[in-house]
Image (tube, rainbow, N blue to C red):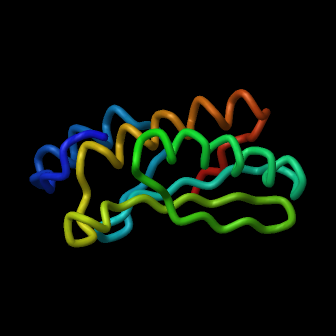
Amino acid sequence: MAELVPLTEVEIGAALAEAPGWRREGDEITRSYAIRYHGGVAMIVHVADVERLMGHHADIDLRWDRLRFGITTHDAGYRLTAADFDLARRIDAIAAAHGAEPVDG
């Protein structure tokens, strides 16, 4: 897993610029995808496998036609770290593999 040192505001801004579609909500980054329920379940399993290998996880909210991820580093006092942005990039790749469409806003 990436280092658990909280990022500075400047570092967070730079990391967000390199993670299009991810939004900051306090000390968490979030992104939603349009995907039907059963496809969302399959995507969650894929993400969970990657998270297990990383030793890092997102908070996940699955609805009938939408899947939302919220990422922060619990072990760093619920602050943003490089691990969060690493996981975000991996989730984007998994979403593309599952045909999930990013939801803006």
Residue at 31 percent across and 45 percent down: it is 83
Residue 67 drawn above or below residue 27: above
Residue at 79 percent across and 52 percent down: it is 40
> Where's residue 52, x and y in %?
51, 47
Between 88 and 52, the residue placed more toward the observer is 52
> Where's residue 46, x and y in %?
68, 41
Between 14 and 50, the residue placed more toward the observer is 50
Answer with left or right where residue 35 lies relative to residue 53. right
Name the quarter where the N terminus is drawn: top left
Answer with left or right where residue 42 lies relative to residue 96. right
Answer with left or right where residue 88 lies relative to residue 102. left
Dividing the picture into quadrants, the one containing residue 64 is bottom right
> Where's residue 92, x and y in %?
56, 36
Name the quarter where the C terminus is drawn: bottom right
Residue at 47 percent across and 55 percent down: it is 57
Residue at 42 percent across and 55 percent down: it is 23
Q: How many marks?
A: 0
> Where's residue 59, x and y in %?
52, 65
